[in-house]
């Protein structure tokens, strides 16, 4: 049963209200590919995301629970 406050997104209300732009909010559930493109100008964020993209995991959503992973994704 999802949490009533976050709807299962696992973030508190303050985190869900953080906005990087008017169009993007934390709760938008970006994929790693989308986040890598969006944060490409910020090396501290872009570098770890690019490693995940290069590994072929760009389709995963930011904050996706491990329980949603396929067996191969979870076991690496």
Image (tube, helix red, strand yellow):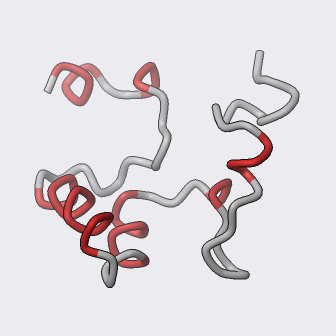
Whether 62 is drawn above or below 39: the answer is: above
> In which quarter of the view is residue 54 placed?
bottom left
| Residue in the foreground of this view, choosing between 21 and 32 | 21
The residue at 69%/61% (across/down) is 18
Can you name the residue that lies furthest to the right here? 4
Count of number-bearing discs: 0
Q: What residue do we see at 44% from left, 19% from top? A: 67
Query: Which residue is painted at 76% across and 57% down in the image?
Result: 17
Q: Nearer the viewer, residue 31 or 40?
A: 40
Give the left or right position of residue 18, taking residue 62 as reference. right
Q: Is residue 24 above or below residue 60?
A: below
Which image quadrant is residue 27 in? bottom right
Percent across and percent down for residue 48 are 22, 56
User: Who is closer to the viewer here, 20 or 74?
Assistant: 20
Q: Where residue 70 sits: x, y (%)?
A: 32, 26
- In this picture, is 47 found above or below 27? below
Q: Residue most toward the top?
A: 1
Tell me residue 37's x, y (percent).
35, 77
Measured from the top left, where is residue 1 in percent x and y? 77, 15
Q: Which residue is drawn at 70% across and 30% down?
A: 8
Quarter the C terminus occupies: top left
């Amino acid at each position: 049963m999802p949490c009533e406050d976050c709807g299962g997104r696992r973030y508190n209300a303050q985190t869900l209200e953080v906005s990087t732009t008017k169009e993007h909010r934390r709760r938008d559930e970006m994929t790693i590919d989308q986040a890598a493109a969006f944060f490409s100008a910020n090396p501290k964020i872009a570098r770890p995301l690019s490693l995940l993209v290069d590994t072929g995991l760009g389709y995963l959503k930011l904050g996706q629970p491990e329980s949603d992973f396929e067996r191969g994704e979870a076991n690496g």
